[in-house]
Amino acid sequence: MGVVTAAMICVLSVMNGFGTLVEDMFSQFDPDMRITATTGKSFSISQEQKDRLTALPSIDLISETISETALIEFNDKQTPIQIMGVDSAFAKITQIENIITDGSYEVYDGAFERAVLGQVLAWKIGIGARFVQSIQIYAPKREGKINMLRPDMNFNRETCFISGIFSVNQQKYDENLMLVDIGLTRRLLEYSDNEITALEVSISDGYNSSKAKREIQEVLGEGYTLQDRYEQQEDFFRILRVEKLLTTLLLV
């Protein structure tokens, strides 16, 4: 076996391991498919559309989410975050309960709003899963005149308590993301009951993303972007570029 051939086998074996690692990592948090509006940040989905989607043989579950930039305050520390409001189906689609490192996954306990934070974000604001102090969340009001005399009046505010901490080992999640109940985000962002920023989709066993995309597009029509879990990840494409570069260098 030549040196170049042996090197190629080693590189491809390592890259295959990377691919397996990435796929395993995706399965813990990212849905099989995410549906967003092609233009604009949010969109509305009717109950009829949801019923038709869940009736598709290629669709196992769907989950409504709302994501937006917000500001949180805890013990006089403030930091911008990505807040994500989730419904009760989110945990079943993403298996996030498997990556909780402290506390538990809970976004509403029946009495209080709860939050699940990325591990680095929790460290940055100095909070742990057993802390009893509340977290303040702020977001700009969507309408109305700006109050220059009372800047605080230009923001909506919600309060929640931490329930758990997760770790995905991906910067964009661990450093910035906080999960809360979708009802809290609707109040905070002044969204209507049918308004969301994404639909998270779990594909049924035996179906691939291409077939699911075709069926979903028949229901929703134009104006939506459908991404499978690989298309959702910039890091995945970076790994592919590294693989291509190393393979090209070995072939020279």
Image (tube, helix red, strand yellow):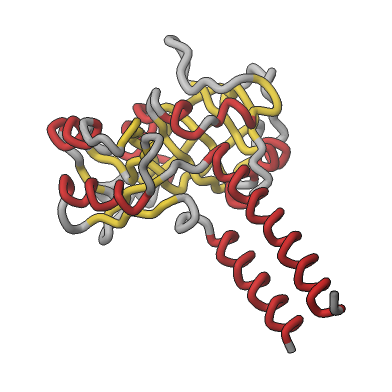
Image coordinates of residue 115 in percent, x first then y, are 53, 27
- Quadrant for the N terminus in the image: bottom right
Q: Residue at x 55, y 40 (%)?
A: 27
In this rendered view, identify the residue nearer to me: 215 or 124: 215
Residue 189: name its quadrant. top left
Picture mark count = 0
Q: Is residue 48 above or below residue 171?
A: above
Image coordinates of residue 45 in percent, x first then y, are 19, 40
Would residue 2 appear left or right of 172 to someone viewing this image?
right
Residue 8: name its quadrant. bottom right
Q: Is residue 197 above or below residue 59?
A: below
- Quadrant for the C terminus in the image: bottom right
Residue 175 appears in the rendering: yes
Residue 156: name its quadrant. top left
Q: Residue at x 62, y 44 (%)?
A: 25
Image coordinates of residue 173 in percent, x first then y, are 59, 46
In this rendered view, identify the residue nearer to me: 180 or 234: 234
Q: Residue at x 40, y 35 (%)?
A: 205
Q: Is residue 196 above or below residue 89?
A: below
Residue 150 appears in the rendering: no
The outermost residue toward the front is 1
Would residue 116 appear left or right of 188 to someone viewing this image?
right
Q: Residue at x 47, y 30 (%)?
A: 180
In this rendered view, identify the residue nearer to me: 77 or 7: 7
Image coordinates of residue 214 in percent, x first then y, are 24, 52
The outermost residue toward the bottom is 252
The outermost residue toward the top is 111
